[in-house]
Amino acid sequence: MAVNVWGYLHEYEAEREEILAAVESVLRSGKLILGPNVAAFEEEFAAYCGAKYGVGCDNGTSAVMLALLALGLNPGDEVVTVANTAVPTVSAIVSAGGAPRFVDIDPATGLMDVSKLEAAITPRTRAVVAVHLFGQCVDMAAVRAVADRHGLFVVEDCAQSHGATQGGRVAGSLADAAAFSFYPTKILGTYGDGGMVLTDRAEVAEKLKRLRFYGMEKTYYALEHGFNSRLDEIHAAILRGKLKHLPGYIARRRELAGRYDAALAGTALTLPATAPGNEHAYYLYVVRHPRRDAVMAGLRERGVNVNISYPWPIHTMTGYAHLGYKEGDLPATEAAAREIFSLPLYPSLTDAEQDTAIAALRETLAGLAA
Ligand SMILES: *Cc1c(COP(=O)(O)O)cnc(C)c1O
């Protein structure tokens, strides 16, 4: 039996009737763009996260870009983030006109090492994008304290952390704005692309609504330069149905993570650590091993597919060479990129599939130790 790192077909089978009914109702409604499903999903998802306003958009990359622009980023402003994130975090900062600056990570969690944040701030710094990587939150009280001392605004990149909490508060309600992706693999995903920005500030929500819709204030009248970054009614309708299942998806993710924790304790793998105050939502279950590539080869031979998120730190990529970083600048980030990989974990992964992955790991690790 091959075990995959992700798959949606079991979940689709289980929810098929509900999903097709949602799509059918949109197609029959005569309203395809910015209609009642987008408005309802914005309200329902914002309420789930404990934020006042939600503005749907076309994907998570746009969500990060629009959040920065709506909060007032100006061309050339520096934005501090991390280099061990999905490329879109950094792509969005550049698309918003910002200049990304990178802080190294805490090796235990893979999250921004906030004790290094202040040293990265210059007179040109305007914002921090805190990436809640793998399903748990950056220490937002610590980020806020630094940001307040320097008059910065803070955006959460929540693309991997739907439903994660910190101090009992849900990711997406912990900064000036938060960006979500509903890409298919995410904790809450649709069958295509989608995104959302959350904020508690009415004027920021109003600006976001203009920016996603050609800068328009009323039909055919642009108040400012904007984009076409809308969320479709079809995806909003699918996501409204899936939002009802989100607590169940997260509970299953946590259950699978607990089974890995128990089965892999005491092996040569470094298991994921949860920072104090956090409840992890386990978008990914990321482990470390000094001979990562050999472990992955052993798993592949045994039919278990794993993934690396992410193999290349962004500051070492050709596409971002112009930012002026070099290998060696972010040692903890670079070391993690050489050793991490993610085990199969998604809500409809069965116990039997997970047990196959665990057995393959144990055999592979025993082979390497011998
Ligand atoms: C997926 C992801 C994004 C981008 O989302 P898209 O919907 O694919 O544009 C941004 N940031 C992080 C951390 C992500 O994982």
Image (cartoon, rainbow, N blue to C red):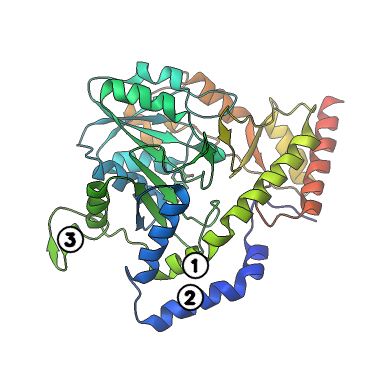
Element type at mark 3: strand
Quarter of the view holding residue 248: bottom right
Quadrant into which the N terminus falls: bottom right
Please give the residue where the numbered disc 1 appears in the rendered image. 238
Kind of residue at badge 1: Ile
View extreme (bottom): residue: 28
Closest to the observer: 263 or 245? 245
Please give the residue where the numbered disc 2 appears in the rendered image. 23
Q: How far apart are marks 1 and 2 (CA)?
A: 7 Å
Whether the residues at callouts 1 and 2 have beta carbons within 8 Å, the answer is yes
At which x and y percent is residue 208?
A: 26, 52
At which x and y percent is residue 139?
A: 47, 28
Please give the residue where the numbered disc 3 appears in the rendered image. 216
Q: In this view, does 225 lie above or below 76?
A: below
Q: Which of marks 2 and 3 is nearer the N terminus?
A: 2
* Label 1 crowd (10 A; few <14 / some 14-19 / many >=20): many
Identify which residue is drawn at 21% across, 39% down.
72
Closest to the observer: 185 or 336? 185
